[in-house]
Amino acid sequence: MIEKQIHHAVHEHPLIYGTIGTVGVVLLWRGIWIIADDVALTGWESVIISLPFLFTLGISVTCFFGHACVKAFMNGALQTSHHALHDMAENDRELKLLIRKKLDAIELDLHDMERNLGK
């Protein structure tokens, strides 16, 4: 019963939900790591034992953080990316305009210099 109350309370906050889930997974992983050290498994033995589990279960980041958290992060990243591209395009336009003005001024100066040399 308390599990449902806690789940409902944190489920509405994907970052907190993901963080708590991640801490749980890391602590579980740490415990397994220590057990593997106690049993004296080599690195290759650990990989050979773990890969079938991971591939069979299809474990991914979304399982740890939940689809809502990953989706919210991706939407935020895409929006940030869109805004950054818009800002870069605006800066590009402003720089082109500034360069054009400078080139026009240089061109006028050159014409003045040519006229003065021709006299």
Image (spheres, rainbow, N blue to C red):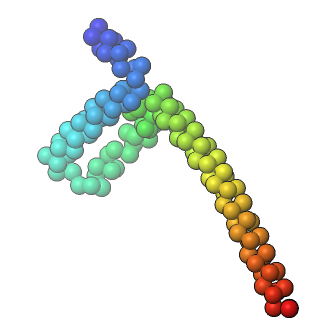
Locate residue 77, reporting x and y percent: 53, 41
Considering only vertical position in the picture, is 113 above or below 24?
below
Residue ID at (78%, 85%): 113
Camera sees residue 82 = yes
Left or right: 83 with respect to 109? left
Camera sees residue 57 = no
Considering only vertical position in the picture, is 85 above or below 21?
below
Which residue is at the front of the view, 82 or 3? 82
Locate residue 64, reporting x and y percent: 39, 33
Which residue is at the front of the view, 9 or 3? 9
Which residue is at the front of the view, 78 or 89? 89
Locate residue 16, reporting x and y percent: 35, 27
User: Image quadrant of residue 10?
Assistant: top left
Considering only vertical position in the picture, is 60 above or below 1?
below
User: Image quadrant of residue 5?
Assistant: top left
Residue ID at (44%, 38%): 60
Q: Pick the quarter of the image with the C terminus.
A: bottom right
Residue ID at (13%, 46%): 38
Locate residue 95, reporting x and y percent: 66, 60
Q: Pick the quarter of the image with the N terminus.
A: top left
Left or right: 117 with respect to 60? right
